[in-house]
Image (cartoon, rainbow, N blue to C red):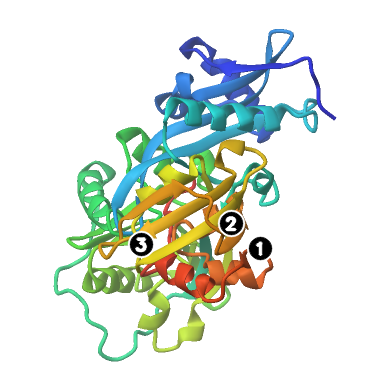
């Protein structure tokens, strides 16, 4: 039931404490000075909306200024949505809907980023606001010592353990190179790196502090959780992040991790759904993967969003887009892609080739969720025979998109 008694506006820098208090309450988190320091470094008050009732902040939603690698064009500006929270006692009264509407309208009216992206705390929340499931992530578990298949190319350069201070500049260099070529990866500021590698005791779950294994063409950040059982060492190695720029660097870094002493199993919570490790192993079943949702994508302005990315094939198609939440997107849009993969997008009265909701356009945007899959789910409707196959080819990516961090 809607509550007419609240208002929504952007925040000031002085309202950070109230913003953080709402987020803590919504996510059942204790107040921690170190967390607030990191969050303050990422806080953009002019891009953060708050909902207020009788002078009290009861909800908030933030946009962080980031760039994400998009198909065919490398890193491009996106609205990275985070800090979305409604205080207990004020839920299911229209607060979240009002915040999402204000946020998307502000982006549209300012000519801001044409695409919004987020990780969802609960997967059923954001579809009604026009977000589509565009990328997944895998929870990976593999036994220590797992053998590689014969002939795996590895680099002769050693993997070395380094201190955090010495490792960070090398990590940033490798990450920037790898991220520029992997759809779904975000660029990172120093504040974003600090958030990704936060390492306070309460975050460790009984594990060590982060360890940094660095190769010239790759790196891994991990923790260890020592344990002993009746048969000997039974420790766990938990990967925070593993990035490589070459197949040899990838294999060398994984070989190092798999051979760490006193470990029985390695786990990684934010692996890619197409993690190459599976294909390095002599026994592919040794790597157990569970896939879940990751990035949700929302075209803020359909014509600018479609023109921002590149395409894998030429097409000339008309999409009939439904968008009740952001009506400026509703209607028929012609997508004309040339031989270089560049698109021109314009409104048209031409009969549609495909009909879909804006959330399905978001789901297909990064090239991971295919339009053909969405059609098989009854979400995309083909009006002209052959249009679905042509559009699926054009939107396809070389690999499934992957975001290496939960933001």
Which numbered marker is on residue 379?
1
Is residue 395 rendered to the left or right of residue 3? left
* Residue 360 sits in quarter: bottom right
Q: Please say whether residue 30 is visible from this viewpoint.
A: no
- Image quadrant containing the N terminus: top right
Report crowding for label 1: few under 14, some 14 to 19, many 20 or more residues within 10 A (C-alpha). Answer: some
Which numbered marker is on residue 47?
none
Which badge, 3 or 2, comes first in the chain's sequence? 3
Q: Is residue 283 above or below residue 346?
A: below
Determine whether the residue tagged by mark 2 lies in a helix, strand or loop: helix
Q: Which residue is mark 2?
A: 360
Q: Please say whether residue 70 is visible from this viewpoint.
A: yes
Q: Position of residue 362 (x, y in %)?
A: 53, 52
Report crowding for label 2: few under 14, some 14 to 19, many 20 or more residues within 10 A (C-alpha). Answer: many
Determine whether the residue tagged by mark 1 lies in a helix, strand or loop: loop
Determine whether the residue tagged by mark 3 lies in a helix, strand or loop: loop
Residue contact between numbered discs 1 and 3, judged by CB atoms under 8 Å: no
Which residue occupies 52% across, 17% down?
16
Closer-to-camera residue (320/274): 320
Residue contact between numbered discs 1 and 2, judged by CB atoms under 8 Å: yes
Q: Is residue 76 above or below residue 239?
A: above
Is residue 7 rendered to the left or right of residue 272? right
Which residue occupies 44% across, 33% down?
64
Is residue 125 rendered to the left or right of residue 152? right
Which numbered marker is on residue 311?
3
């Amino acid at each position: 039931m809607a509550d007419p008694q609240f208002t929504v506006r952007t925040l000031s820098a002085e309202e950070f404490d109230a913003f953080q208090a709402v987020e803590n309450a919504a996510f059942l988190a204790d107040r921690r000075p170190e967390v607030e320091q990191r969050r303050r470094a990422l806080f953009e008050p002019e891009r953060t909306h708050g909902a207020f009732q009788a002078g009290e902040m009861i909800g908030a939603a933030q946009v962080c200024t980031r760039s994400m690698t998009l198909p065919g064009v490398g890193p491009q500006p996106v609205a990275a949505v985070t800090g979305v929270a409604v205080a207990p006692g004020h839920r299911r009264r229209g607060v979240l809907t009002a915040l999402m509407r204000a946020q998307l309208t502000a982006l549209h009216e300012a000519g801001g980023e044409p695409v919004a992206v987020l990780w969802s705390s609960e997967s059923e929340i954001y579809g009604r606001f026009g977000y589509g499931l565009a990328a997944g992530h895998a929870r990976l578990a593999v036994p220590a010592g797992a053998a590689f298949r014969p002939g795996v190319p590895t680099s002769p350069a050693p993997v070395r353990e380094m201190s955090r201070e010495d490792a960070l500049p090398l990590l940033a260099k490798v990450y920037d190179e790898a991220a520029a070529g992997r759809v779904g990866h975000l660029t990172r500021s120093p504040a974003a790196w600090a958030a990704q590698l936060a390492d306070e005791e309460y975050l460790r779950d009984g594990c060590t502090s982060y360890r940094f294994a660095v190769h010239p063409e790759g790196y891994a950040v991990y923790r260890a959780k020592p344990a002993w059982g009746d048969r000997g060492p039974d420790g766990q190695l938990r990967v925070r992040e593993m990035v490589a720029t070459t197949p040899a660097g990838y294999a060398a870094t994984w070989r190092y991790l798999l051979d760490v002493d006193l470990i029985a199993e390695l786990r990684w919570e934010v692996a890619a759904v197409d993690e190459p490790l599976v294909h390095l192993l002599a026994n592919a079943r040794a790597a157990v993967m569970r896939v879940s949702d990751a990035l949700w994508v929302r075209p803020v302005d359909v014509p600018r969003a479609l023109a921002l990315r590149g395409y894998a094939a030429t097409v000339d198609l008309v999409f009939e887009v439904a968008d009740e939440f952001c009506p400026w997107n509703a209607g028929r849009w012609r997508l004309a892609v040339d031989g270089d993969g560049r698109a021109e997008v314009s409104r048209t009265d031409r009969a549609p080739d495909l009909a879909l909701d804006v959330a399905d356009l978001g789901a297909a945007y990064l090239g991971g969720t295919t339009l053909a899959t969405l059609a098989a789910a009854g979400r995309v409707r083909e009006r002209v025979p052959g249009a679905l196959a042509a559009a699926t080819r054009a939107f396809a990516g070389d690999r499934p998109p992957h975001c290496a961090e939960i933001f």
